[in-house]
Amino acid sequence: MWLLELGWLEADEGFGGNTSLMSTKDKSFVNKRRHLPMYAVLVEHPHEGCILWELGSGKDYPDVWGPQVADIFSRVRYEPNHELDAAIEATGHKLEDIKTIIIGHLHLDHAGGLDLFLDRKDVEIWVHDIELRSAFWSVATGADVGVYLKHYLKLDLNWKTFDERTMDFCQGITLHHLPGHTEGLIGMQINLPDSGTFLFISDHCHVIENWRDGIPQGWLARNHPAWFRSTQRLKQLQRQTRGRVIPGHDEETFTALQKEAQQQPEKGAFT
Protein backbone atom coordinates (compact mmCIF):
# COMPACT_ATOMS: atom_id res chain seq x y z
CA MET A 1 0.00 0.00 0.00
CA TRP A 2 1.41 3.37 -1.08
CA LEU A 3 0.46 6.86 0.07
CA LEU A 4 0.42 9.24 -2.91
CA GLU A 5 1.08 12.95 -2.30
CA LEU A 6 -1.10 15.00 -4.67
CA GLY A 7 -0.36 18.59 -3.70
CA TRP A 8 -1.19 20.96 -0.85
CA LEU A 9 -3.90 23.52 -0.23
CA GLU A 10 -4.05 26.40 2.21
CA ALA A 11 -7.33 27.48 3.78
CA ASP A 12 -8.75 29.36 6.73
CA GLU A 13 -8.65 27.18 9.84
CA GLY A 14 -12.40 27.54 10.24
CA PHE A 15 -12.99 25.20 7.29
CA GLY A 16 -11.34 22.31 9.11
CA GLY A 17 -12.76 22.69 12.61
CA ASN A 18 -14.96 25.06 14.54
CA THR A 19 -12.94 28.04 15.77
CA SER A 20 -13.80 30.84 18.13
CA LEU A 21 -15.97 33.67 16.82
CA MET A 22 -15.79 35.76 19.99
CA SER A 23 -15.25 39.47 19.73
CA THR A 24 -11.75 40.76 19.05
CA LYS A 25 -12.59 44.35 19.96
CA ASP A 26 -9.51 46.53 20.41
CA LYS A 27 -7.28 43.70 19.23
CA SER A 28 -5.71 43.04 15.88
CA PHE A 29 -6.95 39.85 14.26
CA VAL A 30 -5.53 37.67 11.51
CA ASN A 31 -7.34 34.55 10.34
CA LYS A 32 -5.24 31.50 11.08
CA ARG A 33 -4.43 29.47 7.97
CA ARG A 34 -3.56 25.79 7.64
CA HIS A 35 -1.77 23.69 5.06
CA LEU A 36 -3.90 20.76 3.90
CA PRO A 37 -2.43 17.78 2.02
CA MET A 38 -4.33 16.08 -0.76
CA TYR A 39 -3.52 12.41 -1.20
CA ALA A 40 -4.59 9.09 -2.65
CA VAL A 41 -3.84 5.51 -1.60
CA LEU A 42 -2.70 2.84 -4.05
CA VAL A 43 -3.32 -0.77 -3.03
CA GLU A 44 -1.77 -3.68 -4.90
CA HIS A 45 -4.28 -6.42 -4.10
CA PRO A 46 -3.34 -10.07 -4.72
CA HIS A 47 -6.74 -10.89 -6.25
CA GLU A 48 -8.25 -7.59 -7.40
CA GLY A 49 -5.19 -5.93 -8.93
CA CYS A 50 -4.46 -2.24 -8.35
CA ILE A 51 -7.09 -0.38 -6.33
CA LEU A 52 -7.02 3.40 -5.93
CA TRP A 53 -8.57 5.15 -2.93
CA GLU A 54 -9.53 8.70 -3.97
CA LEU A 55 -7.85 10.83 -6.62
CA GLY A 56 -7.04 14.36 -5.48
CA SER A 57 -7.99 17.50 -7.38
CA GLY A 58 -7.05 16.55 -10.93
CA LYS A 59 -5.04 18.47 -13.49
CA ASP A 60 -5.04 22.27 -13.89
CA TYR A 61 -6.70 22.68 -10.52
CA PRO A 62 -6.71 26.50 -10.22
CA ASP A 63 -8.24 26.96 -13.69
CA VAL A 64 -10.79 24.15 -13.41
CA TRP A 65 -11.99 25.09 -9.93
CA GLY A 66 -12.38 28.75 -10.83
CA PRO A 67 -10.98 31.89 -9.18
CA GLN A 68 -13.40 32.02 -6.24
CA VAL A 69 -12.73 28.48 -4.99
CA ALA A 70 -9.02 28.66 -5.88
CA ASP A 71 -8.75 31.80 -3.75
CA ILE A 72 -10.41 30.24 -0.70
CA PHE A 73 -8.54 26.94 -1.09
CA SER A 74 -5.31 28.13 -2.67
CA ARG A 75 -2.74 25.65 -3.95
CA VAL A 76 0.45 26.53 -2.11
CA ARG A 77 2.69 23.54 -2.77
CA TYR A 78 2.78 21.82 -6.12
CA GLU A 79 5.38 19.91 -8.11
CA PRO A 80 4.95 17.84 -11.29
CA ASN A 81 5.39 14.67 -9.20
CA HIS A 82 2.17 15.58 -7.38
CA GLU A 83 0.11 14.81 -10.49
CA LEU A 84 -1.81 11.56 -9.98
CA ASP A 85 -0.26 9.71 -12.92
CA ALA A 86 3.26 10.73 -11.87
CA ALA A 87 2.64 9.70 -8.25
CA ILE A 88 1.41 6.29 -9.40
CA GLU A 89 4.44 5.83 -11.65
CA ALA A 90 6.74 6.60 -8.72
CA THR A 91 5.52 3.36 -7.09
CA GLY A 92 6.51 1.30 -10.13
CA HIS A 93 2.97 1.12 -11.50
CA LYS A 94 1.22 2.83 -14.40
CA LEU A 95 -2.10 4.59 -14.67
CA GLU A 96 -3.23 1.77 -16.95
CA ASP A 97 -2.73 -0.71 -14.09
CA ILE A 98 -5.62 0.77 -12.11
CA LYS A 99 -8.61 -1.57 -12.24
CA THR A 100 -10.78 -0.20 -9.44
CA ILE A 101 -11.32 3.22 -7.84
CA ILE A 102 -13.04 3.76 -4.49
CA ILE A 103 -13.97 7.34 -3.58
CA GLY A 104 -14.91 8.44 -0.06
CA HIS A 105 -17.00 11.31 -1.39
CA LEU A 106 -17.22 13.16 -4.68
CA HIS A 107 -16.09 16.66 -3.70
CA LEU A 108 -13.69 18.20 -6.18
CA ASP A 109 -10.53 17.76 -4.09
CA HIS A 110 -11.14 14.02 -3.71
CA ALA A 111 -12.66 13.08 -7.07
CA GLY A 112 -11.27 15.69 -9.47
CA GLY A 113 -8.65 13.19 -10.61
CA LEU A 114 -11.39 11.29 -12.43
CA ASP A 115 -10.43 13.54 -15.35
CA LEU A 116 -7.66 11.00 -16.09
CA PHE A 117 -10.19 8.18 -16.41
CA LEU A 118 -12.90 9.73 -18.57
CA ASP A 119 -12.15 7.28 -21.41
CA ARG A 120 -11.54 4.24 -19.18
CA LYS A 121 -14.76 2.25 -19.27
CA ASP A 122 -12.83 -0.76 -17.94
CA VAL A 123 -12.26 0.88 -14.55
CA GLU A 124 -14.95 0.39 -11.91
CA ILE A 125 -15.61 3.50 -9.82
CA TRP A 126 -17.19 2.70 -6.47
CA VAL A 127 -19.08 5.17 -4.27
CA HIS A 128 -22.05 4.94 -1.95
CA ASP A 129 -25.38 5.07 -3.76
CA ILE A 130 -26.46 8.14 -1.78
CA GLU A 131 -23.25 9.99 -2.65
CA LEU A 132 -23.64 9.40 -6.37
CA ARG A 133 -27.24 10.60 -6.30
CA SER A 134 -26.35 13.66 -4.21
CA ALA A 135 -23.43 14.66 -6.41
CA PHE A 136 -25.32 14.48 -9.70
CA TRP A 137 -28.35 16.19 -8.18
CA SER A 138 -26.11 18.98 -6.88
CA VAL A 139 -24.50 19.50 -10.29
CA ALA A 140 -27.89 19.48 -12.02
CA THR A 141 -29.57 21.92 -9.63
CA GLY A 142 -26.67 23.98 -8.28
CA ALA A 143 -27.82 23.10 -4.77
CA ASP A 144 -24.28 22.68 -3.40
CA VAL A 145 -22.46 24.72 -5.98
CA GLY A 146 -18.65 24.73 -5.96
CA VAL A 147 -17.90 21.46 -4.19
CA TYR A 148 -19.17 19.13 -6.95
CA LEU A 149 -18.17 19.92 -10.55
CA LYS A 150 -19.61 18.57 -13.77
CA HIS A 151 -16.29 18.26 -15.61
CA TYR A 152 -15.42 15.01 -13.79
CA LEU A 153 -18.94 13.77 -12.94
CA LYS A 154 -19.78 12.05 -16.21
CA LEU A 155 -22.70 9.68 -16.71
CA ASP A 156 -20.78 7.34 -18.99
CA LEU A 157 -18.11 6.43 -16.44
CA ASN A 158 -18.32 2.88 -15.10
CA TRP A 159 -20.06 3.79 -11.85
CA LYS A 160 -20.70 1.11 -9.22
CA THR A 161 -22.63 1.72 -6.01
CA PHE A 162 -23.67 0.00 -2.81
CA ASP A 163 -26.29 1.07 -0.28
CA GLU A 164 -25.39 -0.99 2.78
CA ARG A 165 -24.06 0.51 5.98
CA THR A 166 -21.04 -1.79 5.73
CA MET A 167 -19.77 -3.60 2.65
CA ASP A 168 -17.08 -6.28 2.59
CA PHE A 169 -15.56 -5.06 -0.65
CA CYS A 170 -12.91 -7.73 -1.09
CA GLN A 171 -10.48 -9.68 1.04
CA GLY A 172 -8.89 -7.23 3.47
CA ILE A 173 -10.98 -4.18 2.48
CA THR A 174 -14.28 -3.10 4.07
CA LEU A 175 -16.24 0.05 3.26
CA HIS A 176 -18.22 1.92 5.92
CA HIS A 177 -20.98 4.51 5.35
CA LEU A 178 -20.19 7.58 7.49
CA PRO A 179 -22.78 10.29 6.71
CA GLY A 180 -22.24 13.81 8.02
CA HIS A 181 -19.79 15.81 5.94
CA THR A 182 -21.78 14.55 2.96
CA GLU A 183 -24.82 12.32 3.04
CA GLY A 184 -23.05 9.48 1.26
CA LEU A 185 -19.47 9.68 2.56
CA ILE A 186 -17.68 6.38 3.15
CA GLY A 187 -14.48 5.31 4.84
CA MET A 188 -12.17 2.47 3.80
CA GLN A 189 -10.87 -0.07 6.29
CA ILE A 190 -7.85 -1.96 5.00
CA ASN A 191 -6.23 -4.78 6.94
CA LEU A 192 -2.57 -5.37 6.07
CA PRO A 193 -0.66 -8.49 7.18
CA ASP A 194 2.36 -6.64 8.60
CA SER A 195 1.30 -3.02 9.11
CA GLY A 196 -2.11 -3.71 10.63
CA THR A 197 -5.40 -1.92 10.06
CA PHE A 198 -5.82 1.55 8.56
CA LEU A 199 -9.09 3.49 8.54
CA PHE A 200 -9.04 6.05 5.73
CA ILE A 201 -12.05 8.25 6.46
CA SER A 202 -11.92 10.86 3.68
CA ASP A 203 -13.37 14.14 4.99
CA HIS A 204 -15.38 12.66 7.83
CA CYS A 205 -12.57 14.33 9.74
CA HIS A 206 -10.68 17.03 7.87
CA VAL A 207 -7.98 17.44 10.52
CA ILE A 208 -6.84 15.41 13.51
CA GLU A 209 -8.61 17.67 16.01
CA ASN A 210 -11.96 16.50 14.63
CA TRP A 211 -11.02 12.97 15.65
CA ARG A 212 -8.62 13.29 18.57
CA ASP A 213 -10.35 16.13 20.42
CA GLY A 214 -13.92 15.72 19.18
CA ILE A 215 -13.97 19.23 17.70
CA PRO A 216 -16.85 19.38 15.19
CA GLN A 217 -16.21 20.09 11.55
CA GLY A 218 -16.02 23.72 10.54
CA TRP A 219 -17.77 25.69 7.82
CA LEU A 220 -17.99 22.72 5.45
CA ALA A 221 -20.18 20.67 7.80
CA ARG A 222 -23.53 19.62 6.34
CA ASN A 223 -25.30 17.45 8.94
CA HIS A 224 -23.79 17.64 12.42
CA PRO A 225 -26.11 15.12 14.16
CA ALA A 226 -25.31 12.55 11.45
CA TRP A 227 -21.61 13.40 11.74
CA PHE A 228 -21.72 12.87 15.51
CA ARG A 229 -23.41 9.48 15.16
CA SER A 230 -20.90 8.41 12.50
CA THR A 231 -18.06 9.48 14.79
CA GLN A 232 -19.41 7.34 17.61
CA ARG A 233 -19.63 4.38 15.25
CA LEU A 234 -16.11 5.00 14.00
CA LYS A 235 -14.80 5.10 17.57
CA GLN A 236 -16.28 1.67 18.20
CA LEU A 237 -14.78 0.39 14.95
CA GLN A 238 -11.37 1.74 15.91
CA ARG A 239 -11.67 0.12 19.33
CA GLN A 240 -12.50 -3.24 17.77
CA THR A 241 -9.81 -3.19 15.08
CA ARG A 242 -7.13 -1.06 16.77
CA GLY A 243 -6.96 0.63 13.40
CA ARG A 244 -5.15 3.87 12.64
CA VAL A 245 -7.55 6.65 11.72
CA ILE A 246 -6.35 8.81 8.82
CA PRO A 247 -8.22 12.12 8.30
CA GLY A 248 -8.75 13.64 4.88
CA HIS A 249 -6.36 16.62 5.13
CA ASP A 250 -4.29 16.53 8.31
CA GLU A 251 -0.69 17.67 7.85
CA GLU A 252 0.64 16.06 11.03
CA THR A 253 -0.85 12.64 10.28
CA PHE A 254 0.10 12.70 6.61
CA THR A 255 3.75 13.67 7.07
CA ALA A 256 4.18 11.11 9.86
CA LEU A 257 2.83 8.38 7.58
CA GLN A 258 5.18 9.46 4.80
CA LYS A 259 8.19 9.17 7.11
CA GLU A 260 7.01 5.82 8.42
CA ALA A 261 6.53 4.48 4.89
CA GLN A 262 10.15 5.23 4.06
CA GLN A 263 11.25 3.13 7.03
CA GLN A 264 9.34 0.03 5.91
CA PRO A 265 11.19 -3.06 4.58
CA GLU A 266 9.48 -2.40 1.23
CA LYS A 267 10.68 1.19 1.17
CA GLY A 268 7.79 3.58 0.61
CA ALA A 269 5.10 0.89 0.99
CA PHE A 270 3.10 -0.54 3.87
CA THR A 271 2.65 -4.31 3.71
Image: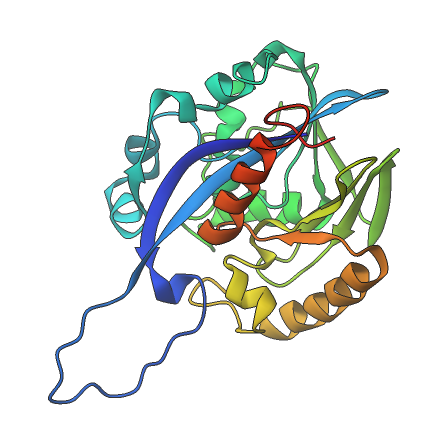
- Horizontally, is 151 left or right of 233 in the view? left
- Horizontally, is 143 left or right of 70 in the view? right
Q: Is residue 30 above or below residue 90?
A: below
Residue 223 seen in the current view = no
In front here: 212 or 152?
A: 212
The N terminus appears in which quarter of the rendering?
A: top right
Q: Quadrant of residue 22?
A: bottom left
Q: How many marks?
A: 0
- Residue displayed at 60% across by 46% down: 105
- Residue displayed at 56% across by 53% down: 203
Location of residue 59 in the rendering, given as x and y in whole percent from the top left corner: 39, 25
Q: Quadrant of residue 229?
A: bottom right
- Horizontally, is 233 left or right of 265 in the view? right
- Residue displayed at 33% across by 26% down: 79
The C terminus appears in which quarter of the rendering?
A: top right
In front here: 207 or 161?
A: 207
Location of residue 190 in the rendering, given as x and y in whole percent from the top left corner: 77, 41
Q: How is the image coloured?
A: rainbow
Q: Quadrant of residue 127?
A: top right
Residue 244 seen in the current view = yes
